[in-house]
Image (tube, rainbow, N blue to C red):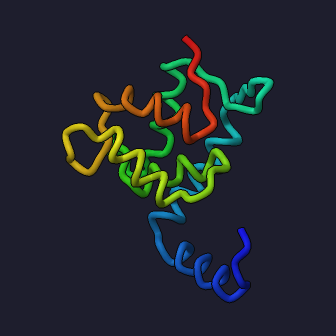
Amino acid sequence: MNLPLHHLVKYTLSLIRSNLVHSVLIMALKNIQAQKVYYSADGKLEMNLEEFKKWLKKFDVDKDGKISKEELQEVVRSTGGRFCRIKGWRGMKFADTNKSGFIDENEFNNLVEFAQKYLHVRIVY
């Protein structure tokens, strides 16, 4: 990211001020350390569908069984993705078929194609 230092500092401080983002970051770090991660030869994170659903649930900070836009942005960030806000919005638009503003457990399957295209994840069957 080629941002001037003062923009980067302002952006970082705004993220730190948000308790939700702070909680999500800590949760993501714990999850990354706790899970066994497998990468394919092309560098994509590999998992089966059940592992993918379990992995997504780790980002559900408030434990309501749904993924919010902010939580989805952290999913993008955890995979080393760039443009987290845009990709989070795109993923929400793609997967949230009932337009509730959340991706519930019934909509997790809708994220498979999105994850493979934008999150550098390969779902193996």
Horizontal side, residue 60 vs residue 80: left or right: left
Picture mark count: 0
The quarter in which the N terminus is drawn is bottom right
Horizontal side, residue 85 vs residue 92: left or right: right
Q: Position of residue 84 (x, y in %)?
A: 53, 57
Determine the residue positioned at 52% across, 27% down: 52
Residue at the extreme top of the image, as rendered:
125
Front residue (pair 6, 63): 6
- Compared to residue 75, the image places residue 19 above or below, namely below
- Compared to residue 28, the image places residue 94 above or below, namely above
Residue at the extreme bottom of the image, as rendered:
6
Determine the residue positioned at 41% across, 49% down: 90
Front residue (pair 9, 27): 9
- Compared to residue 75, the image places residue 2 above or below, namely below
Determine the residue positioned at 58% across, 78% down: 11
Q: Position of residue 116 (x, y in %)?
A: 55, 31
Residue at the extreme right of the image, as rendered:
41
Q: Position of residue 36 (x, y in %)?
A: 70, 28
Determine the residue positioned at 64% across, 84% down: 7
The quarter in which the C terminus is drawn is top right
